[in-house]
Image (spheres, helix red, strand yellow):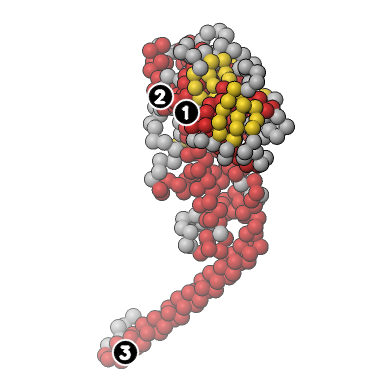
Amino acid sequence: MRRRPGIGGLQKAAAARDQYRLLGENVAKLRTDMMKEQLSTFRSQLEEFARKHKNDIRKNPAFRAQFHEMCANIGVDPLASNKGFWAELLGIGDFYYELGVQIIEVCMLTRSHNGGLISLQELCNHLRQRRKKDREAVTEDDCLRAISKLKVLGSGFEVITIGKKKLVRSVPTELNKDHNQILELAQGQGFVIVEEVQRRLSWTSGRVIDALETLLEEGLAMIDNGHKDGKCRYWFPCVSSVYSSIGSDT
Amino acid sequence: MQKLADFKLPQFFNYPPYFTLQPVRDTREKQIQLWKELILDYCKSQKIFLIGVEEDFPLFSNSAIDRSLSHEARETFLSAIVGEGRAEWLDKGHRKCLILWHRIQDWADIVLQFVRDNGLEDSVMTVEEIRSGTESLGTELQGIDRTILMRALKLLENKGKLALFKGTSADDEGVKFSV
């Protein structure tokens, strides 16, 4: 093709560019409008959803879990900030911040008994007792979410998994692998005996006693010399089913 | 929940290690605190004034979990109450302990209130009447330990609120109130 010379050609090319730009702008504007419309639809739908289901979210733990799943799927964290429009619309933040405060209270209250380590299950029992009047059921899932939000306080709240159980730690005690293994063993009966630990974990008695001594010092264990067989038992209030089962029916 | 008579026992009473004196200081302090409160609450609710360390005091053992307190533990818990001024050892060997869930001063106030409530400001009563007379029926003074009552009356006598005197029979004393 022959290149067209002269000023006419240049003008024509410039006109074509203008045309393209105009078209491009139009398309972009159209897209933005569409996006805006979609967003406003989304927002109004969400508002409607919130209006309709606010109570369900607050009261029904299964619904709440599904809501969180939905949020996770679309990449939104409704708890990221209490000022975000999610929280404002749904009040879902308040629910968890309230729960967080109650979790702290329960941990503080029971700390002298359990040394700052409490099983998630017992924590939930305590919370349900406290919240009886609200008629708002609390699940372990809710507790975990609330605790994950407490982390920003740098208060050392942490969930640790030992065996099948989840424990909530509210003191900065560092538990090593040995301690965790003993706690796992203790989940069976609520206590361990030195020989039993030696046998089950194939440790030397020195290693067992060392770990148990640390757990005693940290206030996580209590000794019991009262059994007929004369063997000293090390009880762990944080995993003891005896204590929590009695506690739950008061 | 387990009960002793109509007394509701706390949860820790069913947790075996609380029946062994704990070696770690912080844990032991907490343990002593719990036992102190339990013993005082129980004595108050059951109107028990005297605990014998060697005796079968209901709180000293729990058959449900097959545990009982050692002599050392009993003495430690009671001594902690004594240290708070809520009890007194009656002997040097620490065998008998007088429990003051109300301090002597508080008992004295209760006596004064009793006198006012019944319009006895200028009356004469025997000590025995204060413990078991019709006026004291249903009040805290009903069945009060004689040692404690006498201590409270002496305190009031020192303040000039009453005068104690020997009655007709040698073993009964009289009280002349002048509130």
Image location (x, y in percent) of residue B114: 63, 38
Q: Chain of mark 3?
A: A
Q: What secondary structure is found at the residue carrying circle 2?
A: helix
3D distance between C-alphas at marks 2 and 3: 94 Å
Q: Nearer the viewer, residue A119 or B136?
A: B136
Q: Quadrant of residue B24?
A: top left
What residue did someone put label 3 on?
Answer: A11
Q: What secondary structure is found at the residue carrying circle 3?
A: helix
The residue carrying pointer 2 sits among few (fewer than 14), some (14 to 19) or many (20 or more) residues within 10 Å by Cα, namely: few
Q: Who's the residue at 45% across and 76% down the image?
A: A28
Q: How many marks?
A: 3
Q: What secondary structure is found at the residue carrying circle 1?
A: loop
Image location (x, y in percent) of residue A73: 54, 53
Decide if residue B74 is in sight here. no
Residue farthest along the right direction in this orientation: B134
User: Which is in the foreground here, disc 2 or disc 1?
Assistant: 1
What residue did someone put label 2 on?
Answer: B25
Q: Who's the residue at 27% across and 91% down the image?
A: A7
What residue did someone put label 1 on?
Answer: B85
Image location (x, y in percent) of residue A210: 38, 17
